[in-house]
Image (cartoon, helix red, strand yellow):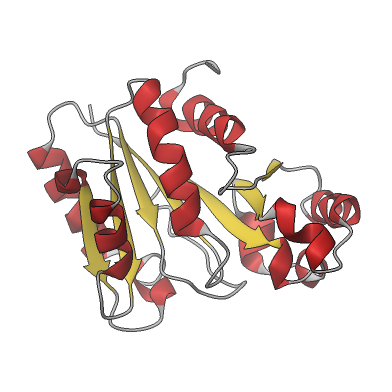
Amino acid sequence: MTAARIGIGGPVGSGKTALIEALIPVLQRRRINFAVITNDLVTAEDAERLRRSGLIDPARVGAVEAGACPHTVIREDPTLNMLAGDRMEASIPGLELIIYESGGDNLASTFSLDLVDWWIFVIDVAGGDDIPRKRGPGVLRCDLLIINKTDLAPHVGVDLEKMLEEAREARSGKPLIATNARGGEGVEALADAIAEAVLFTQPA
């Protein structure tokens, strides 16, 4: 049995790595056997951040250097990521889940379904409440949209409820979750969504 593979993408600074950091202890508590593979342009900075965090065994964190726009290795030619996932599966017995974090990209970033079974797109309120109205492919096509940094809404002049409503309208009712990764809000709901979508288990 091969591990399920999911993707997490979104613009630079939307909170993808912070969201993974918040998700790690939740998945561990649920006894899910998982690993993370990060993508960066020409460094392994996000991978090193996770390895140093103390949250996860460093051997469970891999890194892929895109060498070009991040979407090239999650969409155009995901071979490097597929091989990194294969190596991770070979090294960790019984691996159930691989989380691919894309390098920060734009609203057109999407994942190849040759690479992942299901994917998440992360935007944040500090990036502007007009993002849902722009209807970028990432926002529209992802299996789950995350609107992160909800705690910042009053500080950046964003009407959060209106932003959520416009996102639901743009996505025609497809799933979305509002999160504050730093504070932990919405992270359990995210873990539930992952478990139901690709691990075929009921919410904890």
Q: Residue at x 50, y 49 (%)?
A: 19
* Figure quadrant of residue 167: bottom right
Q: Is residue 72 above or below residue 21?
A: below
| Residue extending farthest bottom | 68
Q: Residue 181 placed where, x, y %?
A: 57, 48
**Position of 165 compared to 118: left or right?**
right
Q: Residue at x 23, y 62 (%)?
A: 63
Q: Residue 61 placed where, x, y %?
A: 23, 50
Foreground pick, 159 / 115: 159
* Figure quadrant of the N terminus: top left
On the question of residue 178 being in view, the answer is yes
Q: Residue at x 43, y 59 (%)?
A: 112
Q: Is residue 132 above or below residue 187?
A: below
Q: Is residue 164 above or below residue 173?
A: below
* Figure quadrant of residue 88: top left
Q: Residue at x 83, y 60 (%)?
A: 154
Q: Residue 70 placed where, x, y %?
A: 40, 74
Count of residue discs: 0
On the question of residue 114 being in view, the answer is no
Foreground pick, 165 / 43: 43
**Position of 190 compared to 114: left or right?**
right
**Position of 197 compared to 25: left or right?**
right
Foreground pick, 42 / 56: 56
